[in-house]
């Protein structure tokens, strides 16, 4: 399968999950053969992760493995294609400047559709912290025949990178479920202000909400489904939303970063906290407390619960089993390992 066929198959919305999986597998195999980077979940390659000030930059093998989070890759690739089409109309005649931050070794969210976009008045900057990933991307671009000035690689920390000029589109996916571990927030806070006012940041929105849920039961429901219908799971499951604990909007991230607080013990820098109160229910101890992540990639391209690794629920072990009436201060902690922190408060 050549790279343009891979791209057009992924974009064709009539294709079944099975065809899409086969296509992404073909992409991964082709990239692996060319670069000798083999996707690896990451557990054996942790030593090659880079522990940066604002989160972990996962190693190239683990970043390659993300391609096989199939629904994620498909939704992002379609979202990127749709965003570029929209921006071409929004900025007619202007060469579009596009930054892909955290491209990893296979530039998965862009490479399959690059041939369908070029030639065009587009300039791509593929950025990653890992030189090995950039070497891999350079080799792939060369092998797939995408040469020339339109595409450059950049080695930098995306949390401090300053682009020379304004950008029309920024693509970035450096996150785990519940925005834990990787620096999605700090990358967004640094990069989003570098967009033109009508530019687009992908993803456009990420919501993390806390719910009471029976995760074992939900796991069973998801296990039985051929194609995950996140709404159906939420409806048939006994799930009680408690609160949206964080919304990441690119246009607000810089200000959120500026207003970050130092925690009372002086040990953490955190975003403005929210207070969550557990309901008084007789059956509350039967529930898990969990965080759910929803991602708006671009327009109608979205990822909801269970549709990808990055939108799986995260059980809050320290809050389970929940106690009726308990109050918690919930804050998103920044730094080398971003994550949510919970602090039990005296009941009101
Ligand atoms: C989750 S992987 C995603 C790879 C690929 N974009 C995809 O979606 O399949 C995140 C990538 O971001 C890179 N990354 C993480 N933090 C970074 C930072 N602060 N600066 C530059 N790159 C970073 C990692 O090295 C890794 O390649």
Image: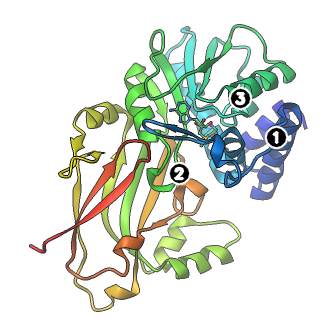
Q: Is residue 116 visible?
A: no
Quadrant the N terminus occupies: top right
Which residue appears at 76% of the width and 28% of the height? Answer: 136
Give residue 197's quadrant in the image.
top left
Asked whether mark 3 lies closer than 8 Å to ligand 1, one says no
Q: Is residue 73 left or right of residue 179?
A: right
For disc 1, the marked residue is: 27
> Where residue 209 sits: x, y (%)?
37, 60
Q: Secondary structure at mark 1?
A: helix
Give residue 254's quadrant in the image.
top left
> Where residue 71 sits: x, y (%)?
66, 53
Which residue occupies the foreground of this view, 61 or 166? Answer: 61
3 vs 1, front mark: 3
Q: Secondary structure at mark 2?
A: loop
> Of the numbered discs in the image, which one, if any, rests on residue 63?
none
Whole-Å distance between the Cαs marked 3 and 2? 22 Å
* 59 to 120, vertically: above or below: below
Which residue occupies the foreground of this view, 149 or 316? Answer: 316
């Amino acid at each position: 399968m050549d790279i343009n066929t891979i791209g057009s198959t992924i974009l064709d919305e009539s294709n079944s999950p099975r065809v899409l999986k086969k296509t992404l597998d073909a992409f991964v195999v082709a990239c692996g053969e060319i670069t000798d980077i083999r996707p690896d979940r990451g557990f054996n390659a942790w030593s090659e992760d880079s522990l940066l000030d604002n989160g972990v930059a996962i190693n190239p093998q683990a970043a390659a493995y993300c391609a096989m989070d199939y629904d994620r890759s498909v939704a992002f690739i379609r979202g990127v294609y749709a965003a570029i089409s929209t921006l071409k109309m929004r900025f007619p005649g202007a060469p579009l400047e596009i930054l892909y931050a955290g491209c990893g070794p296979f530039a998965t969210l862009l490479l399959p559709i690059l041939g369908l976009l070029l030639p065009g008045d587009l300039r791509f900057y593929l950025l990653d912290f890992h030189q090995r990933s950039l070497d891999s991307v350079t080799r792939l671009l060369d092998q797939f025949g995408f040469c020339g000035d339109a595409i450059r690689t950049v080695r930098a920390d995306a949390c401090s990178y300053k682009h020379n000029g304004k950008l029309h589109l920024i693509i970035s996916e450096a996150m785990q479920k519940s925005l834990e571990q990787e620096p999605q927030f700090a990358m967004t806070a640094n990069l989003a202000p570098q967009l033109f006012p009508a530019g687009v940041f992908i993803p456009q929105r990420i919501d993390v909400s806390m719910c009471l849920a029976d995760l074992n039961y939900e796991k069973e429901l998801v296990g039985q489904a051929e194609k995950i219908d996140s709404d159906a799971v939420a409806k048939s499951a006994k799930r009680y939303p408690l609160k949206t604990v964080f919304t990441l909007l690119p246009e607000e991230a810089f200000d959120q970063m500026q207003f970050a607080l130092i925690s009372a013990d002086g040990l953490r820098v955190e975003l403005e906290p929210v207070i969550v109160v557990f309901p008084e229910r007789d059956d509350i101890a039967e529930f898990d407390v969990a965080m759910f992540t929803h991602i708006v990639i671009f327009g109608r391209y979205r990822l909801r619960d269970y549709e990808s690794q990055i939108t799986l629920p995260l059980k809050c072990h320290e809050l389970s089993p929940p106690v009726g009436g308990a109050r918690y201060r919930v804050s998103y902690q920044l730094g080398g390992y971003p994550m949510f922190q919970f602090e039990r408060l005296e009941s009101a």
